[in-house]
Image: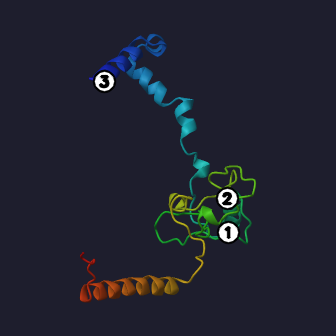
Amino acid sequence: MMAALSARWVRGLTRRSAFGVCFGSRDRAAFLLQRSAVRAASGVSKNDLPGPYPNTPEERAAAAKKYNMRVEDYEPYPDDGMGFGDYPKLPEKSQQERDPWYSWDHPDLRRNWGEPIQWDFDMYTRNRVDTSPTALPWNTMCKYLFGFIGFMLFMFWVGEKYPVYPPVV
């Protein structure tokens, strides 16, 4: 019911709007709305998309400048046909590892304006994967976990073998 009312409202608004009056038809008005500056401002520009893989040192320097990096620090992904192009291969570190007390331009993302982001940026946000080093090595944590599980299984076995009953008066 609400969807039908809303579709009817949009259709009527487009038909009677200034676009419909000025440009003659609803289709032409929709065409102009789709190609307006509002739509173009919300998309990704060509400058933000990765370019072709850099083969010469000059192309490498231009790609490093494009991503606001030094030429020494710039290393693109290997050209294996996955479509990474000239995008820089950044260290796989989560946002948790970045300094929380630094004055970031985007404090919730812990990044500055114009700074390139990782290819898998959505995987390394602060509420997902944390790549910071753990307090204990992995094998020590596994030993503690399986030791605790083994001890509990042993205690359950002892409790089954030697049951304790409450005293009866």
Are the residues at dot 3 and dot 2 in contact (C-beta closer than 8 Å)? Answer: no
**Residue that badge 1 annotates:** 74
Q: Is residue 11 left or right of residue 168?
A: right
Residue at (27%, 88%) from the top-left corner? 162
Question: Given this view, does label 3 or label 2 mark the residue nearer the observer?
Answer: 3
- Counting from the top left corner in percent of width and height, residue 134 is at 58, 76
- Front one among 29 and 135: 135
Q: Which sits earlier in the primary sequence, circle 1 or circle 2?
A: 2
- Quarter of the picture containing the C terminus is bottom left
Amino acid marked by disc 3: Met
Give the Cα separation between the discs numbered 3 and 2.
47 Å
Looking at the image, what colour scheme do you see? rainbow
Q: Is residue 159 left or right of residue 121?
A: left
Establish if 165 lies above or below 106.
below
**Residue that badge 2 annotates:** 67
Are the residues at dot 1 and dot 2 in contact (C-beta closer than 8 Å)? Answer: yes
Give the Cα separation between the discs numbered 3 and 1.
53 Å
- Counting from the top left corner in percent of width and height, residue 46 is at 58, 48
Report crowding for label 2: few under 14, some 14 to 19, many 20 or more residues within 10 A (C-alpha). some
Residue at (60%, 51%) from the top-left corner? 48
Q: Identify the disc placed on residue 2.
A: 3
Residue at (67%, 49%) from the top-left corner? 106
Establish if 140 lies above or below 120.
below
